[in-house]
Amino acid sequence: MRWMEAIRSAFSAIMANALRSLLTMLGIVIGVAAVIAMVAIGSGARNLVDSQIRSLGANLAIVTPGNVTQGGARLGAGAASSLTDEDARAIRREIDGVVAAAPFVQGGAQVVAGGSNWGTRIYGIDLDWFSAREWDVATGRTFDPEEVRRGDIVILLGQTVARNLFGEDEPIDQIVRVRNVPFRVIGVMAPKGQSAFGQDQDDVVFVPLDTGRRRVIGRNYAKDRSVGSIFVKFANESDIEPGIETMTALLRQRHRIIGEQEDDFSIRNLTEIANTATASANTLSMLLAAVAAVSLLVGGIGIMNIMLVSVTERTREIGLRLAVGARPRDILSQFLIEATTLSTIGGALGIALGAGAAYLVAQLAGWPSLVSTNAILMAVGFSALVGIFFGFYPAQRAAKLDPIEALRRE
Amino acid sequence: MALIETRDLSRIYDLDAGRVVALDSVSLDIDQGDFVAVMGPSGSGKSTFMNLIGCLDRPTGGQYRLAGTAVESLDAAGLARLRNREIGFVFQQFNLLPRVDALGNVELPMIYAGFDRRTRRERALQALGRVGLADRAHHRPMQLSGGQQQRVAIARALVNSPSLLLADEPTGALDSRTANEIMALFQELNREGVTIVLVTHDAEVGRHAHRLVRFRDGRVMEDHRQTPVDARDLAPEAAE
Ligand SMILES: Nc1ncnc2c1ncn2[C@@H]1O[C@H](COP(=O)(O)OP(=O)(O)O)[C@@H](O)[C@H]1O
Ligand SMILES: [Mg+2]
């Protein structure tokens, strides 16, 4: 029998018992939904890790002032930071495996250019920033060492800021004002896009560290050459943990903290955040894989059962088909196609359900929802296989029927 | 050469309760264009004989040639092919697919013959026209009377232009007036050249056939020619 005919007749047989068919599909629906959700969550977590690495830079640790175990409240308004440029320089010099130590200060600022003005974040940075964050300019140039040393009044714009202030116009060599200080634009940063947590990373401007401290961000920093935080970039991931230990010792020594005294800084390994996300995604994936396996098995058995019922119910039809010229293999393929159609429709419903679930999880976990074509193909393949595998026995029973006996059956 | 040749055709059932000889060494030739009525008491082996010559069942002994083909040598697929091309079967219970309309039912044998959709549609409509049901093409079996359902079944049996039309008590489930209409249809089809073998209990019907074969206990008890094979050519007035 031709494929199209077989599929058409499969559909009509399925629709003739719509409710029964739907209930039969349930196992497949849940199984496939679990497969889809599993793959989506797995790749969502991987994506989160990737985008975190992409937006921050790989193999990063961050040194922040104060002790997080005591709560961030210690660094309240007016409190001077305990970290300095000198700390950053010492780290760069003395810790093995460090490729960059980028001290920075940050604050909010209103940037004015001609008639337009734009509220954004402003960072005071030194040259290590660019290698630590793996972030360069798209047009123009970055600061030169002299500009950083002197604290020149030059500025780099993030893409969002450049677009909002200048539109299509060329921003380089234009003057923008921050706190009434006229900065010369020397470059526009390459686009970074959204961060893993949905922030626009291009909504930012950069000035030399000293310039930031003295001119725009606040007096507290200016007093003692202190900085907000320090990004420390390592050459290899394996350097990070030992590096953090030696850094802790170094900073304690530099800050004259002895014995039982608490650190006045804290260091976090930024790859750890990503690793935690991966680990919990893996647990969830494993759970879903188990659900998927059990559901697909139960769904397959359900299909086998309903196909056996269907073969019994339609024995006369089979006899008639044989009588008008169906070969055993025509009957076999008819019932196989019916089982496969049943399981594939279940698969399609499962894909919809799974995509919905994946979307929900993604919303809750705060990462982009990812239902890949691969996962869909895999799910369709799985459900078709289940139909073929569990449909085979009933179909073979149908194909082996004797025409006379089949026709005589009530 | 006869269309059907059976030699010592036998069908024996070996049951726990004992041996049942349903058909006992039947040797019979049936020519192209003939109209044979098969009669006999219930259990005499009529259906067994029909199923054997219809290639639905296999004999336990003897030989059977249909249009020159030795049927015993065929496998299940070969038998299916023969049923599809050479034989049209009409059952007492119509055996239409309930979810499919008349047209779809008539198309069924052509699906297995591998015809494309358009050809199937065309020929099915033509066959329905031939049995007087062109205007019921899209009715489902449930929406048709018994006589109309049997006409659809006859159209289905005819649609692949088989050399042989077999009917096992085709009017058994119909009232007598409808039965007469169906019999008239068979006679008309035979006049158009279709070879027909038909099981009936109706002596009147038996009288209208060209040849009457009577079974008893699995054997041919009487074989009586009433009209020459092709009545039209040989004796037009005798057919009246
Ligand atoms: N499947 C079967 N198993 C056992 N005996 C059968 C079977 N089919 C038919 N018979 C027996 O074969 C004999 C002939 O049956 P059948 O050809 O149906 O008779 P008819 O059609 O003339 O009434 C009967 O005795 C019947 O009981
Ligand atoms: Mg009978």
Image: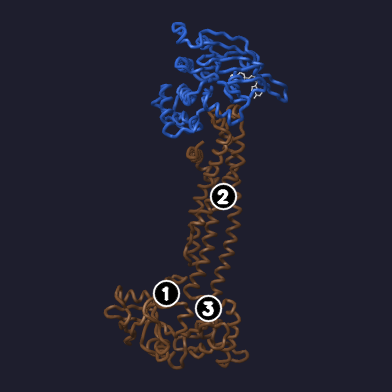
- The residue under label 2 is which amino acid type? Gly
Question: At 36% across and 79% down in the image, what residue appears?
Answer: A140
Q: Which mark is residue A354?
A: none
Q: Is residue B181 visible?
A: no
Q: Helix, strand or loop at disc 1?
A: loop
Tell me the brown chain. A
Ligand 1's image quarter is: top right
Label 2, label 1: how far apart the Cα atoms are:
44 Å
Residue nearest the viewer, comparing B109 with A122: B109
- The residue under label 3 is which amino acid type? Leu
- Name the residue that disc number 2 marks: A27
Chain under numbered label 3: A
- Name the residue that disc number 3 marks: A60
Check disc 2: other Cα within 10 Å, few if <14, some if 14-19, many if 20+. Answer: many
Q: Are marks 2 and 3 on the same chain?
A: yes
Task: Say if disc 3 is inside 8 Å of ligand 1.
Answer: no
| Left-right relation of A302 to A195 | right
- The residue under label 1 is which amino acid type? Gln
Question: At 30% across and 73% down in the image, what residue appears?
Answer: A168
Q: Colour of chain B?
A: blue
- Name the residue that disc number 1 marks: A201
